Image (cartoon, grey):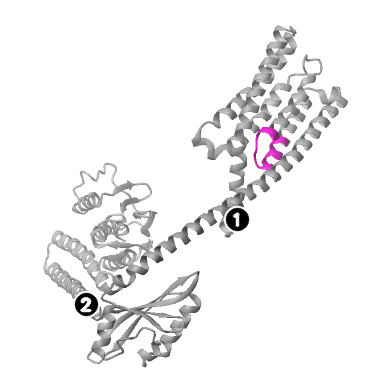
Amino acid sequence: MPKNSRSALPDEFRDYYLRKSLPALRIGLTLTIILFALLIVSNYFIFNKPAENLFFRRFSLILPIFLLSILVTYFRRLLPYLQPIFIILNLLVCPVIFLVGYKADLNTPGYDFFFAWVMLLVFGLFTFYRLHLRDLLIIGGCQILSFILTITWNGTLTRNPLKMINSLFFIVAGYSLVAILAIIIEKLNWKNFIHRKALSAHYQNLLIESKTRLKAEEALQNNETQLHNILDAIPDWIYVVDEQYRIVMLNSALKSEHERQGYYEDCIGKKITTVYPLISKKALQEFDQIFRYGQMILEKQDFELVDRKIHGEVRKVPIFKDQKVVQIITIMRDRSREQEIEDLKSRNIQQKEMMIREIHHRVKNNLAIVIGLLTLQQKLSNNDELKRIIRDIELRIRSMALIHEQLYRSESFEQIPIEQYLASLASNLGQVFGVPRIHLITDLTPALMSIDVALPIGIITNELVTNAFKYAFPSDYGEGIIRLELSKKTEDELSLTISDNGTGLPANFNIDNTPSMGLFIVRLLVEQLEGKMEIVSQEGTLFRITFKNQATFNQ
């Protein structure tokens, strides 16, 4: 029996043991409720003892628990959870025991029935509820403990210790007796369960084996009449050898090839070494291995024929009878055309990759030229505002150029490692602004990202980090820290955080109405990514953008 099925047996037995006891549980608890109701009615109307009847009515606190125990067994959806439900319901008996007895004393009418009632509850626990023995022992112990606590609370322990000890003795003795009976019953049911499982498994195995043999015999009878016709219709070269390495069957395609190549045409009954004198020792060893172990062998093999060379695929498949390999069917397929197509595809893919890589390289170089022209224009201009605008444009173009550089260097042209891209972008921004008192710290979680997501993220990072360098730390400000963080929130959701410990945003700041072109671009790109942006301006400024990583969906 497999290990996993062996480990599942105790759980299966508990389910079987519990469900088997449900009819008895329903009947037993129903009779208990009826008898208890008759006791209260008879005591009130026949014996006319209202004082004792009041004490008996306290016992009726247990009735809702019995009713719930019965009701839950009729709901199919609750059947898998009966074990924990019954444990909880029986643990609720403990406070009921305490509530019944904690205000009573030796002079309370009906008090003499209290310990008997507790003992009957313990008996009922072990009799009606087929829980795990360990759980039964714990719950029964808790009920006895509740009895001890309540008789200690109501003074029975101090007023009449002998009565308490006698009552406790009977309860513990009853608890021990029913526990032993529960152990015996569970063991007997376990043996019965194992025997039933074994018989069922053997019966199922016999049925399967009988059906398998019947189907195999019918299939053999049908296949023997159709096998040659089917094999002759296959264009592959097929032959079958027996345990003496004699050829017992060839299909039409192989017979035609024998005729073309000058081999034996009447091969049936001849040994394979006679028909194919140049057959390799490796091939013969493979035949021997298949006859011994019954494992199929698939390999590629080149054939040197009289008029051509072919790339072939050879499949040797064992044929079983009575669980023993009696024949081997060999299928040889000409894969020359497919090999040529595969080689052509491989060359095309390599050429395509080289072309794409070259395109990204040229785009990066062209963007570098644009950056150079902007830098030259910035140096020639005397307008400070124009210089600022040119530098902002240059930084945005640099973030785009970095994408193409990452794609050019990456093994994949569809996704880039975003952490490397953002690290390079942060390094460039740090070099451009070059303020020694401002430190740029990065904490980037590795992730693959498509260019459609990476480019907006790069521009957003460029704008927010640039703004932090330019505006977060005035000239009279001390040392500052800018943090660039990328983290995973879920498997397909990322969080980009750019924060600083600078002066913070103005009190009336509103990104929807800001005149800043950079923040306007950030807002548009966040909407394009269908992301969410959180802005916090306390002890500095924090921008947190949460967005879906589309690269995850494409994998």
Classify residue 414 as left or right of residue 54. Answer: left
Foreground pick, 99 / 55: 55
Magenta residues? 125-140
Quadrant in the rendering for residue 464: bottom left
Q: Is residue 9 above or below residue 426?
A: above
Residue 333 is situated, as x and y percent measured from the top left of the image, at: 29, 78
By secondary structure, the bulk of the magenta-drawn segment is best described as: helix
Q: Residue at x 74, y 42 (%)?
A: 184
- The quarter of the rendered structure image containing the N terminus is bottom right
Disc 1 crowd, CA 10 A, few/some/many (<14, 14-19, 20+): few
Residue 294 is situated, as x and y percent measured from the top left of the image, at: 47, 74
Q: Is residue 409 above or below residue 24?
A: below
Classify residue 219 as left or right of residue 428. Answer: right
Q: Which residue is mark 2?
A: 341
Foreground pick, 267 / 506: 267
Q: Which residue is mark 1?
A: 6
Residue 153 seen anywhere in this rendered image of the structure: no
Whole-angstrom CA distance, mark 2 to mark 1, is 52 Å
Q: Residue at x 29, y 71 (%)?
A: 229
Q: Residue at x 53, y 40 (%)?
A: 80
Q: Secondary structure at mark 1?
A: helix
Q: Amino acid at mark 2?
A: Ile
Q: Is residue 376 above or below residue 62?
A: below
Q: Amino acid at mark 1?
A: Arg
Disc 2 crowd, CA 10 A, few/some/many (<14, 14-19, 20+): few
